[in-house]
Image: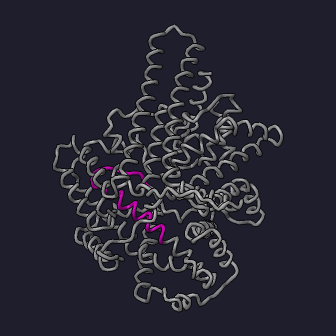
Amino acid sequence: MAFTSFYFLVFLLGVLILYYSIPKRFQWVLLLIASYAFYLISGIAQVFFLLGTTVVTYGSGLLMQKRRNRYKAELAASPDLDKEQKQLLKKKAGSDIHRIQVLTVILDLAVLAVVKYSSFAIENINKLIHVFGSESTIPGLNIIVPLGISFYTFMAMGYIIDIGRGKYEAERNFGKLALFLSFFPSIVQGPISRFDDVGKKLVAEHKLKYENITYGAQLITWGFFKKLVIADRVSPVVSQIFSVKMIDKLSGTTLFFGMLAYAVQIYCDFSGGIDITRGVAEMMGIELPQNFERPYFSTSVAEYWRRWHITLGAWMREYVFYPIMLSKPISKLSKKVKDKHGQKASKYVPSVITPFIVFLLIGIWHGANWRYVAFGLYNAVIVAGSVALDPLFKKMAEKLHIKTEGKGWKVFRIIRTFLILGISKILVKAPSLKMAMKVILKIFTSVNIAFGSEMVKYEFDLGYKNNIVLGVAVLIVFTISVFQECGFHVRQSISKWFIVFRWLIYFLLLIIILVFGIYGPEYDAANFIYQTY
Amino acid sequence: MLERIIEILQGIRDDVDYYTEDALIDDGIFDSFDIVGLVSELKDEYDIDIIIDDLTPENFNSAENICALVKKLQEED
């Protein structure tokens, strides 16, 4: 059931009416039932994967908690222990908990690997076998990737690692943990929530509040606007430009235009979907974490990754980046470099190595394909390179007398970052890695100023009216983003307007979506891109 | 100790008033690379072991909090 389908709106309305009619202590139970009902529509077999991960996560969490409680009890029962004995007890408990933690994470990852990455692995093994002259092939597993598996598996792993670290106590109620992992608005494409934040909000009692309903509805409408009016309108053009048969025919300038169009599409598709998710949750009084903070206004690639898919970046930082950076092998390496090359060099070595691991994982998280591996490596090279070359850039700016505090420099950095990231988006969108390289090469070598005529010639121009709608819609999103970037709270400000003007704006937006939204057969819009990750 | 910690912090970023700033992490003034750089300097300077569990925003939001963390870890050692 797609968010943009009519059935979803009916489903949501039904859930909302029940949610605010039943006794508040049962609200979370209703959400759990609704979430599993929502998930069941995507297939019974898929539910078993979700349920399996939930059972394993729940059981492991409890086991770790039990071991920690035993350690605490042992400590309390023997107050006369000396420091060494206490440390021994702590170490023993720590290693037991660590063992359960590692096993669970491996199990979670194994399920993810089998359903999501086995086809990719088998395909490459077969290629390798053929290279060595054998005719035999390993058959593929043909498993349908369960909806939202990358999202709920990461949430489950985050929960297990947090319990291992003693950040909070394990959840004793199976249903409450099951709701955290399956909450229907966020199961499709995140955000990747944390249990100590969202887990509590989901099971809290929520009163019907006018602001929650209106703010939520506004956010949903805004999400629909970005998805239906912009992303789905630009989508066919982007698909045509980046198709196998077109890449060879088109000039680099049209391909560059395609890159810009894809940047607009993916942002409006993903952030629009997240707006709908957060809006739905807000209507129930549940605040989900932000996943976007106007990422295209970033002045560096590292900053972009703190503003695009924020919850995935935060997950990687918390559970991959810091543990690696603070790990013993990296510390040892730093010390070695420090002894040989001094303090400054020792700081740069881990900062250059770790982005490769983190971004490779981010790339692979998106999907099983060499294009995603290249996407990860490309981002890593940029981030690690900018850390390593930072002193050089600073010296250059000084020598060239560039005012690094000025607005002009900031705008230059924003455009530069946007273009660097545009290249990485080609790696994701092109049909193959080879084709992506071709596109990138063409952009730099084949210029055709009259690129619009190519679109007309190959019949994928949107037409005058659609171009106007698209232009105005993108301008609206851009203007609102600039306002937000300047610290202006758009929703709160509109809510203070005179009631007639306020509702006029809401209806106008709704009419724009209904009239200018792109709908497929049976009025179902296209799926979200991130739904497939 | 506070003075020395502020010196270390100024070595990482010199455009912050560490005597008044109390949201180094919450306001995104320090990014993850800055934090790791700071941790490695603190480890060297005070011969302490800072582990992942210590990396909470509260521990690193201000110079004073960092100072308190270092003192706590020294006592634990």
Is the residue A217 above or below the residue A187 in the image? below
Q: Is residue A280 magenta?
A: yes
Q: Residue at x 54, y 34 (%)?
A: B53
Q: Residue at x 44, y 75 (%)?
A: A474
Segment colored magenta = A265-290
Residue A493 percent coordinates (x, y) = 34, 63
Residue A239 percent coordinates (x, y) = 50, 76
Q: Is residue A348 magenta?
A: no
Quadrant assignment for the N terminus of chain B: top right
Residue A508 showing in the rendered view: no
Residue A394 percent coordinates (x, y) = 73, 58
Q: Residue at x 40, y 40 (%)?
A: A196
Q: Residue at x 60, y 66 (%)?
A: A424
Query: Position of A43 compared to A60: left or right?
Result: left
Query: Position of A165 compared to B11: left or right?
Result: left
Foreground: A193 or A471? Answer: A193
The answer to which image quadrant residue B43 occupies is top right
Query: Position of A176 compared to B55: left or right?
Result: left
